[in-house]
Image: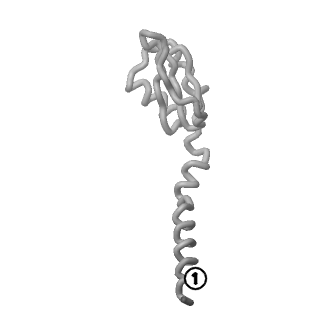
């Protein structure tokens, strides 16, 4: 009977510890090392979007991720300071470049 209470306490603590983010995860998401800067890639407006240009723009803007958004395409609207978005027209000509 005396062992049940300590065993339950240890089990609860183990569960709570498992829910904590690791220090490397917290630093990767909280740091500004890969925060996007769209002003560095505004020269690509008017260019034809391609996978190669998307990767080049992502690296130059220091973004962690990048995407091409076409007219009428469904996208997530959550703000992500580490994501570069190239908005195009129907012919994939870049109309707007932004972060978020």
Residue nearest the viewer, comparing 73 with 55? 73
Q: Position of residue 33 (x, y in %)?
A: 57, 45
**Residue depicted at x 44% and y 29%:** 56
The C terminus sits in image quarter = top right
At horizontal 50% and vertical 39% (from top left) the residue drawn is 64
* Up/down of 49 relative to 66, above or below: above
Residue at image coords 48%, 31%: 66
Residue at the farthest left position: 51
What number of labels is visible? 1
Residue 23 visible in the snapshot: no
Q: Residues within 10 Å of mark 1 (few under 14, many from 20)?
A: few
Q: For the N terminus, give its image quadrant.
A: bottom right
Q: Secondary structure at mark 1?
A: helix
In the image: residue 49, left or right of residue 45: left
Does 42 sit left or right of 93 as displayed?
Answer: right
- Image location (x, y in percent) of residue 2: 56, 90
Q: Residue at x 52, y 26 (%)?
A: 85
Q: Where's residue 52, x and y in %?
A: 38, 26
User: Which residue occupies the extreme front position in the image?
Assistant: 1
- Closer to us: 33 or 20: 20
User: Where does label 1 land, which residue?
Assistant: 5
Can the viewer see residue 85? yes
Position above or below: 31 against 57: below
**What x and y, as percent, mark residue 73?**
47, 19
Q: Quadrant of residue 27?
A: bottom right
Q: According to the image, what is the colour scheme of the structure? A: one colour
In the image, residue 30 sits, relative to residue 71, either above or below, namely below
């Amino acid at each position: 009977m005396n062992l049940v209470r300590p065993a339950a306490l240890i089990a609860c603590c183990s569960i709570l510890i498992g829910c904590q983010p690791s220090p490397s995860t917290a630093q990767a998401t909280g740091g500004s090392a890969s925060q996007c800067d769209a002003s560095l890639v505004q020269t690509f407006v008017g260019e034809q979007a391609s996978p190669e240009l998307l990767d080049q723009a992502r690296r130059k803007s220091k973004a962690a991720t990048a995407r091409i958004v076409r007219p009428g395409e469904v996208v997530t609207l959550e703000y992500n300071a580490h994501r570069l978005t190239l908005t195009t027209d129907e012919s994939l000509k870049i109309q707007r470049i932004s972060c978020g």
